Amino acid sequence: MIEIREMRMSDELRVRELCATLPEMDMERERPLGFHLKRSTLVAVEDGTVVGHTTWSHHDLFTAWDETVVAASHQGRGIGRQLMEARAARTPGFIIGAAHDENEPMIHLLTSLGFHACQRVGSMMMYTRPHPKERLE
Ligand SMILES: CC(C)(COP(=O)(O)OP(=O)(O)OC[C@H]1O[C@@H](n2cnc3c(N)ncnc32)[C@H](O)[C@@H]1OP(=O)(O)O)[C@@H](O)C(=O)NCCC(=O)NCCS
């Protein structure tokens, strides 16, 4: 059974391991220590092991969705959806996310959570989700 909870300090090593599997994450772009703890991070835990996380940063006017990673051994079981739904439900206001063109699971997740493509940046599409109460007609 999967538990979704807030990240703790003791999760940092494992979350950094998961993050290091992101295709664009090379040595020069490695997240600094404390990156995930300083932001808003939820982890998915199975049998005491962190198997996924989602990290968001809150700004004055918007929330940025920084990354969501599920361990390769655990992908395709609905864990990414559980993480993103849990965080999106707890996040009011305007949210900005991004997905590479080839990342079909992530594009599907974002659009099914109400995000809309808004701006291309190279091979990446930016997505936004207006607050339900603030949507313009
Ligand atoms: C993207 C990622 C977080 C998704 O996590 P996951 O636990 O595997 O995803 P889920 O099992 O919750 O499935 C997500 C949805 O994508 C769908 N999906 C899976 N493969 C798909 C594909 N090729 N095309 C379209 N949709 C697809 C699933 O059916 C599911 O939709 P549903 O809930 O409506 O059935 C995970 O694949 C991952 O960690 N990838 C590597 C890291 C990454 O690229 N992160 C994103 C950028 S930070």
Image (tube, rainbow, N blue to C red):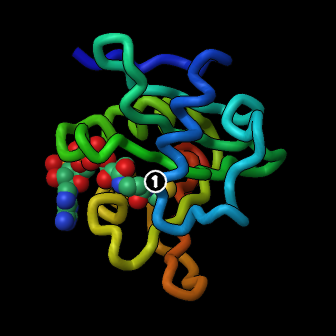
Residue lying farthest to the front in this orientation? 27
Question: Judging from the image, what secondary structure is the residue with disc 1 in?
Answer: loop
Q: Residue at x 29, y 12 (%)?
A: 47
Q: In this rendering, is residue 101 above or below 86?
A: below
Residue lying farthest to the bottom in this orientation? 122
Q: Residue at x 47, y 73 (%)?
A: 117
Q: In this rendering, is residue 128 above or below 52?
A: below
Q: 59 or 43, which lies in front?
A: 43
Q: Residue at x 68, y 55 (%)?
A: 30
Quarter of the figure with the N terminus? top left
Could one spot residue 9 in this view of the protein? Answer: yes
Q: In this rendering, is residue 117 above or below 17?
A: below
Residue 112 coordinates in the image, percent (x, y): 30, 54
Image quadrant in which you'd find residue 121: bottom right
Could one spot residue 136 in this view of the protein? Answer: no
Residue 4 coordinates in the image, percent (x, y): 41, 20
Q: 116 or 4, which lies in front?
A: 4
| Circle 1 residue | 21
Q: Is mark 1 within 8 Å of ligand 1?
A: yes
Residue lying farthest to the top in this orientation? 48
Q: Amino acid at mark 1?
A: Thr
Residue 77 coordinates in the image, percent (x, y): 18, 38
Residue 94 coordinates in the image, percent (x, y): 64, 51
Q: Residue at x 49, y 84 (%)?
A: 123
